[in-house]
Image (spheres, rainbow, N blue to C red):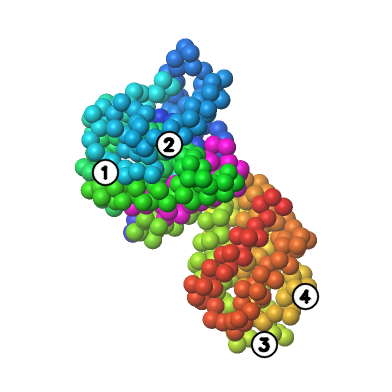
């Protein structure tokens, strides 16, 4: 008898970074979580983490082995100091705020990755129990498994050894389920040194093989402040300097630091810059998480891992929307509809809707599918594979007569396909973490009753006004549809 192959259902990530590099913020953003993750040992037993707390400090939230401290009264003073430091860095190119040469002394001057005489930072006063072998999982996003390394800030030689052994062990496992799939290496840009000698040693001596490393530069808004000061010193008006600062910061980063990172023996396969993760709006945080996941997916060589990553991030709805369009199921169906008679064509195609919903794991993997059953005179569905398509199609039937009759069959398919993507995304936001088939029906009904359907129809007519007869299976067509679905999300509706 052939042994059954167990398909992996979790994407495993090692996250590395010094204390206060924003690791916990990143994990929460990616997993859509507010609380702390559950921690498990190598045998799957839950571990209770007791943080080490100095008397003068009081922790607010314990997230696994990393503690997010309460905002102390001196936070405003620290903010003022950062502002002063930013201006000092910009007005005094040769000044250094640390006793050792930092990697970045000034965004306007060349950056150096030279040896640092004292590369080991003191450990965080709020660092608790730590074990890289422990697994961190958020209940709201069980598709992700994280392992945390504190970075090379205390006992660098020992930490490097542990990380090297962990990576080698996890990368060489025969089972994809237990392998390490990606490494996120976090650097805080609000520090006066981006990379210590020990961190350079990681990229120069540890070959991670097929496991991609993604360098994440957090708190990038700190560089925005420096860029703003630089522009102000150049005589740029306040409002204009404020507007141009993010772009200028990115340009300086790309020009001065990025080339040096690429010169390392084993450079990261991708670089992601994240800003406003602590005090940004939900939309900003979601966009940042989406960018990180998308960049991670782009570094994967195995198509099966790419699918696993998409399935793991239940809350990264935007990536699921892009994946649904990028799969070409909509554009290929539109291409096939080019020869259809508009007077008899039915754009509600069961297989199309099913294939679209497959790109949304929180719909496809519903535990209560069997409890949902839909019948109507035109579209009978008696199997659980068809239930979610039936729920959508029952609610969307009025779309045919009210919006689509005047459109050609291919454009009708594009409209229905976009509707399915938008409805699937909205279904998640109606009940995050517990999306049921009732949410599909409610989301489709809201799509019809709101102005979203009209906006989508107009957007498709505009996008394809010059090519009403196709071709539709092109990269330009997919890009246009991605823009349509993302611009018409019903997250807040």
Cα distance between the residues tagged 2 and 4: 66 Å
The disc, 1 or 2, on the residue closer to the chain's N-terminal end is 2
The disc, 3 or 1, on the residue closer to the chain's N-terminal end is 1
Residue topped by disc 4: 401
Q: Which mark is residue 341?
A: 3
2 or 4: mark nearer the eye: 2
Q: In the depicted view, which residue is nearer to us: 134 or 465?
A: 465
Cα distance between the residues tagged 3 and 2: 70 Å
- Regarding residue 149, the answer to whether it shows in the image is no
Q: Residues within 10 Å of mark 4 (few under 14, many from 20)?
A: few
Q: In the depicted view, which residue is nearer to us: 109 or 352?
A: 109
Residue at the limit of the structure toward the top, as seen here:
55
- Residues tagged 1 and 2 counted as in contact (Cβ below 8 A): no
The residue depicted at 78 percent of the width and 73 percent of the height is 402
Cα distance between the residues tagged 1 and 4: 60 Å
Q: Residues within 10 Å of mark 1 (few under 14, many from 20)?
A: some
Assess whether residue 15 is covered by the magenta stretch: no
Looking at the picture, does residue 327 appear above or below residue 62?
below
The disc, 1 or 4, on the residue closer to the chain's N-terminal end is 1
Q: What span is in magenta?
A: 268-297
Q: Quadrant of the N terminus?
A: bottom left
The disc, 2 or 4, on the residue closer to the chain's N-terminal end is 2
Cα distance between the residues tagged 1 and 2: 32 Å
Looking at the picture, does residue 428 appear above or below residue 404?
above
Residue topped by disc 1: 203
The residue depicted at 56 percent of the width and 59 percent of the height is 321
SS class of the residue under badge 2? helix
């Amino acid at each position: 008898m052939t042994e059954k192959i167990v398909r992996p259902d979790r994407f495993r990530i090692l996250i590395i970074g010094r204390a206060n590099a924003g690791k916990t913020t990143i994990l929460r953003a990616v997993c859509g979580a507010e609380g702390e993750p559950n921690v498990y040992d190598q045998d799957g037993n839950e571990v209770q983490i007791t943080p080490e707390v100095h008397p003068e400090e009081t922790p607010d939230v314990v997230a696994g082995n990393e503690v997010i401290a309460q905002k102390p009264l001196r936070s405003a003073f620290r903010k003022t100091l950062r502002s002063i430091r930013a201006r000092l860095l910009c007005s005094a190119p040769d000044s250094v705020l640390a006793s050792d040469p930092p990697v970045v002394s000034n965004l306007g001057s060349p950056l150096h990755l030279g040896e640092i005489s004292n590369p080991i930072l003191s450990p965080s006063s709020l660092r608790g129990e730590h074990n890289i072998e422990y697994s961190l999982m958020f209940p709201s996003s069980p598709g992700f498994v994280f392992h945390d390394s504190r970075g090379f800030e205390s006992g660098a030689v020992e930490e490097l050894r542990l990380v090297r052994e962990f990576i080698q062990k996890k990368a060489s496992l025969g089972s994809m389920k237990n392998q390490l799939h990606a490494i996120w290496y976090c650097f805080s840009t609000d520090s006066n040194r981006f990379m210590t000698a020990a961190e350079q040693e990681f990229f120069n001596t540890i070959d991670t093989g097929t496991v991609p490393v993604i360098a994440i530069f957090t708190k990038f808004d700190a560089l925005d402040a420096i860029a703003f000061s630089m522009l102000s010193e150049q005589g740029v008006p306040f409002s204009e300097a404020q507007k141009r600062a993010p772009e200028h910061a990115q340009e300086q980063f790309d020009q001065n630091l990025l080339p040096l990172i690429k010169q390392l023996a084993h450079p990261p396969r991708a670089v992601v810059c994240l800003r406003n993760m602590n005090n940004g709006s939900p939309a900003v945080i979601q966009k940042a998480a989406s960018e990180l996941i998308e960049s991670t997916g782009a570094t994967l060589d195995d198509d099966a891992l790419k699918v696993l990553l998409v399935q793991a991030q239940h809350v990264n709805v935007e990536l699921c929307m892009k994946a649904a369009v990028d799969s070409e199921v909509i554009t290929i169906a539109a291409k096939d509809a080019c020869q259809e008679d508009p007077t008899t064509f039915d754009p509600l195609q069961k297989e199309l809707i099913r294939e679209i919903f497959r790109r949304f794991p929180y719909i496809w993997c519903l535990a209560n599918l069997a409890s949902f059953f839909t019948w109507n005179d035109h579209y009978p569905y008696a199997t659980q594979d068809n239930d979610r398509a039936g729920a959508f199609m029952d609610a969307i039937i009025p779309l045919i007569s009210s919006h689509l009759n005047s459109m050609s069959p291919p454009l009708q398919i594009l409209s229905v396909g976009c509707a399915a993507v938008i409805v699937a995304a909205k279904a998640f936001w109606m009940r995050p973490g517990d999306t049921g088939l009732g949410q599909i029906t409610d989301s489709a009904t809201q799509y019809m009753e709101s102005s979203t359907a009209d906006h989508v129809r107009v957007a498709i007519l505009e996008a394809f006004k010059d090519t009403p007869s196709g071709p539709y299976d092109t990269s330009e067509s997919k890009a246009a549809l991605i823009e349509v679905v993302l611009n018409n999300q019903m997250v807040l509706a």
